[in-house]
Amino acid sequence: MMNRMRKVLVLFILLSSLIQKSTAGCVWKGDLYVFDGIVLYLLDADKEDFMFEERNDTLYIMPQTYFTLDGAGLFFPEDIHVVNLQETIVIGVKQETTDDTPAVWLEFSSERSRLEKRMKQKYFLWTSQEQEEYLYRHHWGAVKGLSLQFQKMYYNNILERQTEYKECCPEYIEQAKDVLAMKDKDFASFRQLHAYPQIKYRTVAIQYWKQQERRHIVVVEKPL
């Protein structure tokens, strides 16, 4: 982690000098996007993963692939004075069932926001994993109820069509019987429910001063 941080800070210093005054000036270098002198650290990202679009004094950064901004770092050079930074996320929960069925969103969402004022030189975005504890504290009952409702409907449907499933995948019949035999109280974690919190939408609004000019950048993430 320390080596990674050193790498970011060194490249951050070198690349910041390449950025012109306009927010349209974006530079890609390794794991870094640099815009208006601000460094966005995206581990293992490629150029094709994000699209940049300038609208007036706002720069929108939109993921184009399944890559996300989870845990991404924002680094600010000394000539940028952040007035405030507000990160807002919408959290959803994806439900997994049988192996050949894609996970689906449950009918649930929760919004969180945090505001940082007069920041120093770095900020790390929330991750989906960090939201699991939050949802467990504040929304466990609601999520558990929706998950069990969905699973009972899904697995009862398998048992009603046992003849079809005996041909292709009899193991799903056994899985359905095992899940439906469990009592509601036996499910005590997201893992046991096979339900996983994920960030569905994120905005990061940054207001800052640079070269005696007040500027505004919005980072928008809406994963596929």
Image: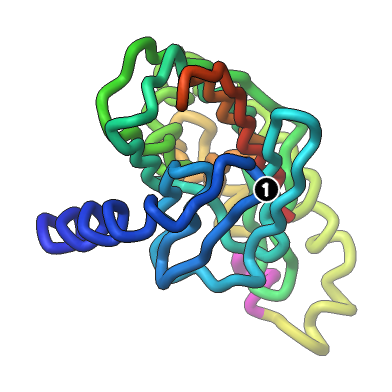
Colour setting: rainbow
Residue at x-position 31% and y-position 53%: 12
- Residue 46 occupies quadrant: bottom right
In the image shown, does 124 or 150 lie closer to the viewer?
Answer: 124
In the image shown, does 209 or 47 lie closer to the viewer?
Answer: 209
The furthest residue to the left = 2
Residue at x-position 56% and y-position 40%: 21
- Residue 105 occupies quadrant: top right
Residue 205 within the segment the image draws in magenta: no
Q: Quadrant of the C terminus?
A: bottom right
Residue at x-position 67% and y-position 48%: 24
- Residue where numbered disc 1 is placed: 24
In the image shown, does 146 or 223 lie closer to the viewer?
Answer: 223
Say above or below: 159 vs 57.
Answer: below
For the residue labelled by badge 1, is the local secondary structure a helix, a strand or a loop?
loop
| Residue range (magenta) | 171-175
Residue at x-position 63% and y-position 41%: 22
Q: Quadrant of the N terminus?
A: bottom left
Say above or below: 145 vs 70.
Answer: above
Q: Let me know if residue 44 appears in the view.
A: yes
Is residue 180 found left or right of 209 in the rendered image?
Answer: right
User: What is the x, y in percent for residue 116?
Assistant: 39, 15
Q: Let me know if residue 139 appears in the view.
A: no
User: What is the x, y in percent for residue 16?
Assistant: 38, 51
Is residue 40 found left or right of 214 in the rendered image?
Answer: left
User: What is the x, y in percent for residue 113?
Assistant: 52, 16
User: What is the x, y in percent for residue 126?
Assistant: 43, 35
The type of residue carrying mark 1 is: Ala
